Image (cartoon, grey):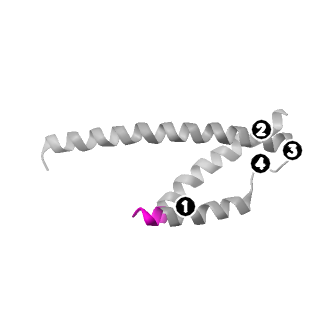
Amino acid sequence: MKVSDMGVLRERIDQLDHEIIALIAERFKVTEDIGLYKAKNDLNPQDRSREAEKFAKLSELANSYGLKPDYAVQIYRCMMDLVISRHIEIKDKI
């Protein structure tokens, strides 16, 4: 691989990172609304059945794109943990 090829690949990674961050930000805005809804309706910040359902679907989706399902689960576990923590904060404020 040429150094110039590496530059092109890194530019593509940078573009993808930009798109990923934009989507994550949008996702977190939606989860903020969900957290408010849960707090106002006295719902548990964590929904284990929804998580199990989501992880199963994410595993299938990852597999369909040639991504190891465990990678997707690990990434989403991290995001969900952050969301749950935020939902707890929201509930404590209301």
Which amino acid, by three-letter code, is at mark 3? Asn
Residue 7 is left or right of residue 40, and the answer is left
Which amino acid, by three-letter code, is at mark 4? Pro
Residue in the picture at 72% in, 38% down: 33
Mark 4–mark 2 CB contact (< 8 Å): no
The tag earlier along the polypeptide, 1 or 4, is: 4
Question: Circle 3 — which element?
Answer: loop
| Residue picked out by circle 3 | 41
| Residue picked out by circle 1 | 58
Q: Position of residue 84 (x, y in %)?
A: 70, 47
For the residues marked 4 and 2, what is the alpha-carbon distance in whole angstroms?
10 Å
Quadrant housing residue 55: bottom right
Is 23 magenta? The answer is no
Q: Tell me the magenta residue range.
A: 62-69
Which amino acid, by three-letter code, is at mark 2? Leu
The tag earlier along the polypeptide, 2 or 3, is: 2
